[in-house]
Image: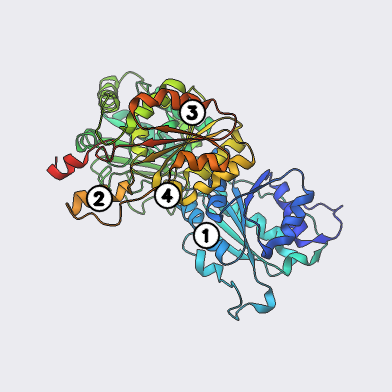
Amino acid sequence: MSDSRANTRTAAQLLVAELAAHSVDRVFCVPGESYLAVLDALYDEKRIETVTCRHESGAGFMAVADAKLTGRPGVAMVSRGPGATNASIAVHTAQQDATPLVLFVGQIERKDRGRRAFQEVEYRRMFGDMAKLVVEVSDAARISEATAQAFHAATTGTPGPAVVVLPEDMLLEEVASGPQGPQRTLLAAPSPGSVREAAALLARAERPVIVAGGRLSLPDARRVLRQAAEAWGIPVLVSFRQQDIFDNEHPLYAGHLGYLLPRQQVATYQESDLVLAVGTRLGDVTTQGYVFPTAPKPKQQLIHVYDDPAVLGSVFQTDLAVLAEPVAFLKALAAEPGGEPGRHAVWAAHLHRGYTEMARWEPQEAADGVVFGAVIQGLHRRLGADAVFANDAGNFSGWLGRYFPFKASQRLLGPVSGAMGFGMPGAVAAAFRLKRRVISLIGDGGFLMTGNELATAVQYRLPVTAIVANNCSYGTIRNHQEKFYPGRTIATELRNPDFARLAEAFGARGFRIDRPQDIDAALDGALAADGPSLVEVKTSLEHISAFTTLGALARKD
């Protein structure tokens, strides 16, 4: 609703008022001359904290991480041209991760558009395949409208990124209107008939499983997922990088559908006769390369619940497609009569036993460094029920996924997109939002992409602990090379700095783990630090992942 008392203001000032009306309390930015007027307007808006970042990719990743924690659009602001291209990795991640993001991009003056002016980019073409909406505001009177449209697009159906482009001269024009405010949130409630039909299919199934996706990551959604699973006694598998949404020690927890699962584990899941997929788009990683369920015709019966018609039926033939908000569906299913909690107890125990056997840690030593699973065990012994992880992309992350038993009260932030560089910015955003220590797991390659955001953590004295797995290799690619091109490794060897000393140069506390005997002292020191800390772990390259070794790959085990 418009504010009739609003005085004349600049478009930049109205934009900031619109952000406040949308309950935005934090924006992440790298300052730029193309949106100086917005920065000046933020100076006067005390309800919004402006976080200065060291690279636009870091600002974008921070906004994505913040959105994962709140369920509301994260907001990043960048300048034209290079700023926008640097931030594009966050737009791609938001699209892949189904995470709401609104990116504001400065633009050249309107009079110079179409002349290939300095840093000019046509953003509709640049972001058109990634963003749900790209709008350039040429008329200052429509800046509230465009902003409200962007927030609405980012949160409707499959959440994702929206981009608002701000010509520099437009921001200085005066407007007389007030902020429009958010549009009403659309909620696709499940039809009673679809819930009854799903219940009937579940009642006939002998070996059903729930595949729970990232749309169930917020605390209330986790609670409802557990209620529905317990009401029907159905084992729960979680989608890629969502290990934290269901208590891993619960007897109905069946495992995590991530990378590099053993064939035997996937074969166990394929024994199911019904898959209830809720809040997941069933991408290639979660489906283990489209074999669980099998595309396009699953071997099991498939019930797919999502609130975007573009998702349902686009890859998989379904026995029942339910166009509904995932949490609303699970609430209705939990209340639907017909569930028999103990009926699938043997099946659930079979799946849970397979998970626990795979997740059992047996101490290992290596001649070329520390086996990273030992560090994960050290974290497990120390972290409580409110632990928060920001996980970068890389083979090292598999050790956390395999050996850390998550509780639903803990949080795991990680890029489903597989984008390296998320870990440090994600931890910074989480520390801002949650006001408690955040553990960032990062590979040596990923740290040297966005590790500069450690400076942001130091500047704001944030309780962030980065644990850098240093095996002097782009490990994931080396893993693939050894598998598909044995004996022909190229471009994956790294020569790295002393990360612990580098952290100290930033103003953080630095620690090293060179041997297993160093783990306890280094973790204790880093977790007790007043402000940011970093632990460099000299990790074994031989133990290249949580599921294989270089020797096993050479032997084709």
- Distance, label 4 to label 2, CA atoms, is 16 Å
Question: Any mark on residue 410, and which?
Answer: 3
The amino acid type, in three-letter code, at marker 4 is: Met
Q: Quadrant of residue 485?
A: bottom left
At horizontal 30% and vertical 35% (from top left) the residue drawn is 369
Residue that numbered label 2 is attached to: 480
Residue 555 in percent (x, y) is at 12, 42
Judged from this view, the residue extending furthest toward the left is 555
At horizontal 76% and vertical 56% (from top left) the residue drawn is 40
Question: Any mark on residue 86, and which?
Answer: 1
Between discs 1 and 2, the one toward the N terminus: 1
The amino acid type, in three-letter code, at marker 1 is: Asn
Asked which secondary structure carries label 3, the reply is loop
Q: Are marks 4 and 1 in contact (CB under 8 Å)?
A: no
Q: Are marks 4 and 2 in contact (CB under 8 Å)?
A: no
Asked which secondary structure carries label 1, the reply is helix
Q: Quadrant of the C terminus?
A: top left
The amino acid type, in three-letter code, at marker 2 is: His
At horizontal 57% and vertical 61% (from top left) the residue drawn is 83
Asked which secondary structure carries label 2, the reply is helix
Q: Nearer the viewer, residue 518 or 50?
A: 518
Q: Residues within 10 Å of mark 4 (few under 14, many from 20)?
A: many
Above-or-below relation of 298 to 14: above
- Distance, label 4 to label 1, CA atoms, is 14 Å
Between discs 4 and 3, the one toward the N terminus: 3
